[in-house]
Image (cartoon, rainbow, N blue to C red):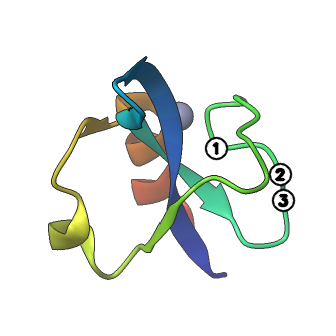
Amino acid sequence: MYCEFIAERGQRTGGTTRVARWHVVRQDQHAALCGQVLAHDAETVPIADPHAIVQGGVCPACWNRYRSLP
Ligand SMILES: [Zn+2]
């Protein structure tokens, strides 16, 4: 099963939108593992590349569920 990180956008300041939090979403679903629905055009990062996340943190609920996936 392929998952990826997807950005939850936070406050918008001066034309740039910061990333509030990164959720984990399955490729074939719209909702994150924690149940939150993110914008379909939100930025994504490959699950295998967590070092690409430089802003915001990973949603702990999503991460726990991802770690417990079979
Ligand atoms: Zn989440």
What is the C-alpha distance between the residues marked 2 and 1? 10 Å
Q: In the rendered structure, find residue 29 and report the number of the disc placed on it.
A: 3
Residue 31, given in percent of the width and then of the height, sits at 78, 43
Q: Nearer the viewer, residue 69 or 27?
A: 27
Q: Quadrant of the C terminus?
A: bottom right
Dot 1 beta carbon under 8 Å from ligand 1: yes
Q: Residue at x 34, y 25 (%)?
A: 14
User: What is the quadrant of residue 59 in the picture?
Assistant: top left
Three-letter amino acid code of the residue under disc 2: His
Q: Residue at x 50, y 32 (%)?
A: 9
Residue 43, given in percent of the width and then of the height, sits at 53, 59
What is the C-alpha distance between the residues marked 1 and 3? 9 Å
* Crowd rating for badge 2 (residues with CA inside 10 Å; few <14, some 14–19, many 20+): some
- Mark 2: which secondary structure? loop
The answer to whether residue 9 is left or right of residue 11 is right
Residue corresponding to mark 2: 30
What is the C-alpha distance between the residues marked 3 and 2? 4 Å
Residue 54, given in percent of the width and then of the height, sits at 15, 54
Three-letter amino acid code of the residue under disc 3: Gln
Q: Nearer the viewer, residue 28 or 40?
A: 40
- Mark 1: which secondary structure? loop
State yes or no: discs 3 and 2 in contact (Cβ < 8 Å): yes
